[in-house]
Amino acid sequence: MNGRIKKKQIATQVNAFHLTLTTEETGCPLCMRPIPKSQRDAHHLIPKSRGGIETVILHRLCHRQIHATLTESQLAQNYSTIDALRAHPEIAKFIEWISNKPIHIQAAIKKSRDKGFL
């Protein structure tokens, strides 16, 4: 391998290593719980469809809740930081609920009735 593909592969490995270190040290930035390897999801703070490139590692359920609650436009315009996400009423209610659950919990996430109307 050479050129562009090799560079992309190396960059991916470096990013994966960096994300592994930060999530093992701090846990999920949304719910503040440790993230098991099987439950890690990368979340684009600004959706890729809106030009975003920065990602954070979240619990799979936290990530699913974000996308069940907010549209990509809402994420890009008003909720492009962890602090903004934590301040959203439905996300805050979810965080309160999940904060005392086991880290391997499996739960159904329902699409918000208000999605797209905030």
Image: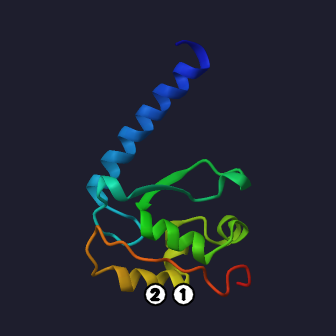
Q: Residue at x 65, y 68 (%)?
A: 75
Q: Residue at x 44, y 82 (%)?
A: 94
Left or right? Give the position of 9 relative to 19.
right
- Residue 106, percent from left and from top: 36, 72
**What kind of residue is marked 1?**
Pro
Q: Secondary structure at mark 2?
A: helix
- Residue 2, percent from left and from top: 55, 12
**What kind of residue is marked 2?**
Lys
Asked whether disc 1 touches disc 2, contact meaning CB atoms under 8 Å apart, the reply is: yes
- Residue 82, percent from left and from top: 50, 67
Q: Residues within 10 Å of mark 1 (few under 14, many from 20)?
A: few
Number of numbered discs? 2
Q: Is residue 81 positioned above or below 112 on the image?
A: above
Left or right? Give the position of 9 relative to 112.
left
**What residue does disc 2 label?**
93
Q: Residues within 10 Å of mark 2 (few under 14, many from 20)?
A: few
Tell me the distance, in whole angstroms, between the alpha carbons under discs 1 and 2: 6 Å
Q: Is residue 94 positioned above or below 12 on the image?
A: below
Left or right? Give the position of 33 relative to 5.
left
Instruction: Give residue 59's quadrant in the image.
Output: bottom left
Q: Residue at x 34, y 51 (%)?
A: 22
**What residue does disc 1 label?**
89
